Amino acid sequence: MMQGQDIRDRLKDIEDFLLDEYKENKEEKKRDWRTYEQRLMNRIKGAIKNLKPLIGEAMNFETHRGAGKETRD
């Protein structure tokens, strides 16, 4: 009967084998910098569009001239 440690050792061996096979068969792709930069620019623009209303709301504050904090009625 196999013990828990035997199973873990066997799984580790299988994982190492699969990792080695994957590394050998993996094709290295060169990064297309133009496309990468265009996609990054679009992601940043989208993030800014989504954040713009939140920034406006966060900056919406009132100032009062005078001494101290206003009292509530």
Image (cartoon, rainbow, N blue to C red):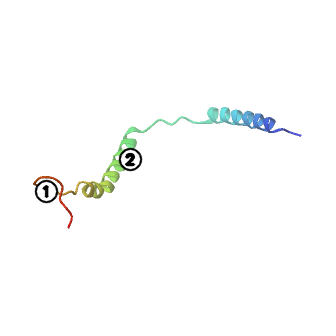
Give coordinates of residue 73: x percent, y percent.
20, 67
Residue 12 located left or right of residue 46: right
- Residue 39 x/y as whole percent: 38, 47
Mark 2, Cα crowd under 10 Å, few <14 / some 14-19 / many 20+, is few
Which residue sits furthest bottom? 73
The residue at 21%/56% (across/down) is 61
Q: Are marks 1 and 2 in contact (CB under 8 Å)?
A: no
Q: Please state, as top left, top right, bottom left or bottom right, where the N terminus lies in the image.
A: top right
**Side of 60 where 21 appears, left or right:** right
Q: Position of residue 71 (x, y in %)?
A: 19, 61
Judged from the image, the secondary structure of the residue bearing numbered disc 1 is: loop
Q: Which residue does the numbered mark 2 point to in the structure image?
A: 39
Q: Amino acid at mark 2?
A: Arg
Q: Secondary structure at mark 2?
A: helix
Q: Which image quadrant is residue 70 in?
A: bottom left
Quadrant of the rendered image containing residue 2: top right
Q: Earlier in the sequence, mark 1 or mark 2?
A: 2
Callout 1 amino acid: His
Front-most of residues 34 and 71:
71
Residue at 34% x, 52% y is 47
Residue bearing mark 1: 64
Q: Looking at the picture, does residue 3 appear above or below residue 39? A: above
Q: Nearer the viewer, residue 65 or 41?
A: 65
Return the residue nearer the eye: 37 or 4.
Answer: 4
Front: mark 1 or 2: 1
